[in-house]
Amino acid sequence: MNKIPYSYTRNNLLDIPQNYQMSSYEGPDFLISYQFSRKKIITELEKMPDFISFSNNFFSSQDISDVYEIIKINKFSTNELYHSIIMELISNPKNTQTIPIIDKFLKKFEIRKRIFLNYDNEFNIIGDEFKEIQNYVLLSFMCLIRYQTTSDLKYLNTFLKLNDLICSAKKLIVNKIDISLFHYLLTSEMKYVLKLLDESGIWLE
Amino acid sequence: MVGIILTSDNRSKAYIQKLISNKIKLEHIILMNKKTEEKSFSENEIKISKSYGFDISESVIQTLVKNNLAYKEFDFIDINHPELIKYVSKINLDYCIFTGGGILKHQILNLGTKFIHLHPGIVPYYRGSTCFYYSILRNDNCGVSAYLMDENLDTGDLILQLSFPKPSHIYLDDIFDPHIRSEALIAIFSRKLLEKKKFQKQEKSDSSPFFIIHPVLKHIAILRCIK
């Protein structure tokens, strides 16, 4: 049994953002607690009535505009943009054109820990609504695809933070696709953390 | 003329103590001090810091007083504060070492004094925050880049870059980070790099900066050091 609870998902991070500054070192038990916490949520997601295994086909049938058409709009929908970027990433993971846009949103999330419903064509926030959980799930998926393509740790880093936030607000995940996608994100996250532990020669008891 | 802006943090402790022990004299010492309570350290932390050439349990003020060093004290920590800008413009320094982070605004950059920052990462690859953890995870080492600060994040002209093997203890934030930065600071003076003025433009890079490391990655980096 883990001695220290994993504290980074305890509060709803949509309400109380976590800045992760000067986080303390708690020894190897911390990583066991992290794994325990993630596994618990993975099991909860599997038990949800609408749970089905994730497939990239979830995104294939959608009729969505081109990324660069969307960002020209004065008030664009973040959700529509994210769907469009993901479809582009899935069809061509090495396409570099969308990377600056992904990096822009990664930076926005890292600074404010929030993703707003709408932005203008200069990426300024429009409105004050930021509790659409699907946007966090979609940005997390983009981070995963980028990490799988590049092994760049900055994507794994933001991926972990986004997943903390989604875990902390898991009651908002009700949509069938979000349930399945978030399950896939968490299992992938654990796989890559285990890989990094393995490459580092660290074995947890 | 060279000066230094200290705060009361561990980095400033390492900088000022190593400057003194290496007999490097600076013309002006500025201390930005909010007078917060000093953190206490374990015997092991003190022992490790001493093995690196500084005593983490000795406050910056204690060091300055013990060595009869004159300093100008401000009760705020803000590199862009108007009072600080006014003072720096009056003392007319060529270079000023800044121990803190953040971005310098127009007003302070336009004084004519060149500000030196020691960043714990090899730029342009490791820009941003907590970079030494990322370089331990990827390269098993840590780097320091000393550069002249400009308006952007970690993009100024380079004075020197040094690499260090990863440590074999867990005190990366409090001890190892101040240690490697202060070693680079001493190297600037011992190699007379400010007199030579051979500063290099940074390589162009499209890579975006790193952000504060997630605790899971931080733990893996630290466990990688002590395994």
Image: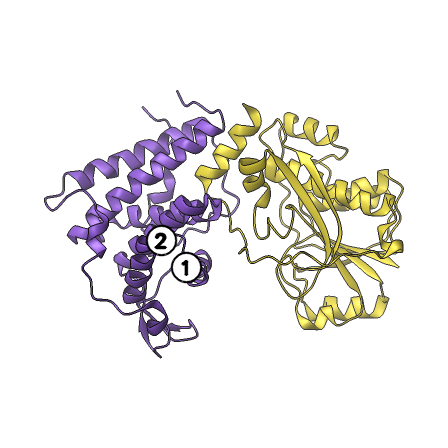
**Residue A102 placed where, x, y %?**
41, 59
Residue A148 disc label? none
Left or right of residue A72: residue B94 = right
Displayed quadrant of residue B4: bottom right
* Residue A136 in view (yes/no): no
Image chain in purple: A
Residue B187 visible in the displayed image: yes
Colour chosen for chain B: yellow
Relative image position of residue B192 (x, y in whole percent): 88, 49
Please state which amino acid type lies under the numbered disc 2.
Met
Q: Chain of mark 1?
A: A
Q: Residue at x 64, y 51 (%)?
A: B123
Q: Where does label 1 land, which residue? A: A102
> Pointer 2: what residue?
A142
Is mark 1 in CB contact (under 8 Å) with mark 2?
yes
Question: In this image, B150 relative to A183: left or right?
Answer: right
- Up the image or down, A72 lies above or below A113; here it is below
- Expressed as whole percent of the image width and height from the top left, the position of residue B60 reads 74, 45
Q: Quadrant of residue B199?
A: bottom right
